[in-house]
Image: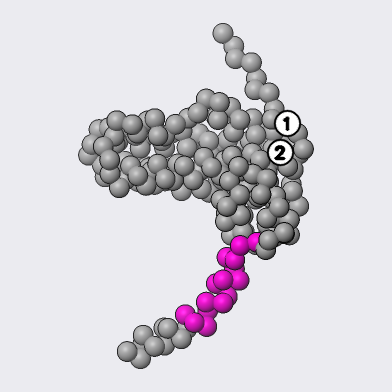
Amino acid sequence: MAATRGSMQLLLLLLPTVFLLVRPAAAGSPLMLACAKTPHPDVCTTVLSANPESATADARGRAEIAISAASSIGAAAGTYARGELDIVKDTDLWQCLDECAQDIEEAVSHLDDSEGDLDAKFRDVRLFVDTAERDTWSCEESCRAAPASAVKATMLHKNDAFEKFMRVTAALIQQATGAAAPEPAPSSP
């Protein structure tokens, strides 16, 4: 009982510090105003508020933080899918996870591999996000035949979170550059 009381006292002492570290941005702050202009303001605010640098970052800094956060969110989703591949026995669920992992890993590679100056990186990421939205890589479509399960539900939830934040990232890049979406390169026959 004494250990429980000591643990509770420690928790009560640390709780305000925890809230200070992860509290959402204040209403009217540059971060809140920027997030309000994205397709998913609540997701934007939650994810960017987790990075203390976002509170003082300008538009370009927020876009850079968003690219990094999107990469982390995607990597976590891809890692989840790959981890479950070794466990699942259902062929349709295995295919669902494998295809989702491939699509997410490709997206993350575009986020991580963008090279050059910041403007070139923004262009590359924006072009990929815009193209991906038109082509709609769809984890949901890949998982249609898979039976309902906790694994499938978790995978779809993680993919949805990643897709939402990719849209947020594109909007923050647009705010940073002030540019309309770049035109995709023409397809060769």
What segment carries the magenta color?
11-25
Residue 175 located left or right of residue 167: right
Residue 90 in which image quadrant:
top left
Residue furthest bottom in the image:
2
The answer to if 23 sits in the magenta stretch is yes
The answer to whether the residue labelled 1 contacts the one labelled 2, judged by CB atoms less than 8 Å apart, is yes
State the quadrant of the N terminus. Answer: bottom left
Measured as percent of width and height from the top left, residue 125 is found at: 63, 35
Mark 2 element type: helix
Label 1 secondary element: loop
Give the number of marks.
Answer: 2
Residue closest to the far left: 89
Residue at point 68%, 45% (across, down): 37
Residue closer to the observer: 73 or 44: 44
Mark 1, other Cα within 10 Å: few <14 / some 14–19 / many ≥20: few
First in sequence: mark 1 vs mark 2: 2
The residue drawn where x is 35% and y is 44% is 153
| Position of residue 35 measured from the top left corner of the image (x, y, whole percent) | 66, 50
- Amino acid type at circle 1 is Ala
Residue underneath mark 2: 174
Q: Quadrant of the C terminus?
A: top right
Q: Is residue 170 above or below residue 2?
A: above
Q: Which residue is mark 1?
A: 180
- The disc placed on residue 42 is none
Residue at image x 69%, y 55%? 31
Mark 1 → mark 2, Cα distance in angstroms: 7 Å
Q: x, y percentage for residue 119? A: 74, 37
Dot 2 amino acid type = Gln
Prevailing secondary structure class for the magenta stretch in the rendered image: helix
Q: Position of residue 41 (x, y in %)?
A: 61, 49
Q: In the image, is residue 3 part of the stretch drawn in magenta?
A: no
Q: Give the image quarter of residue 7.
A: bottom left
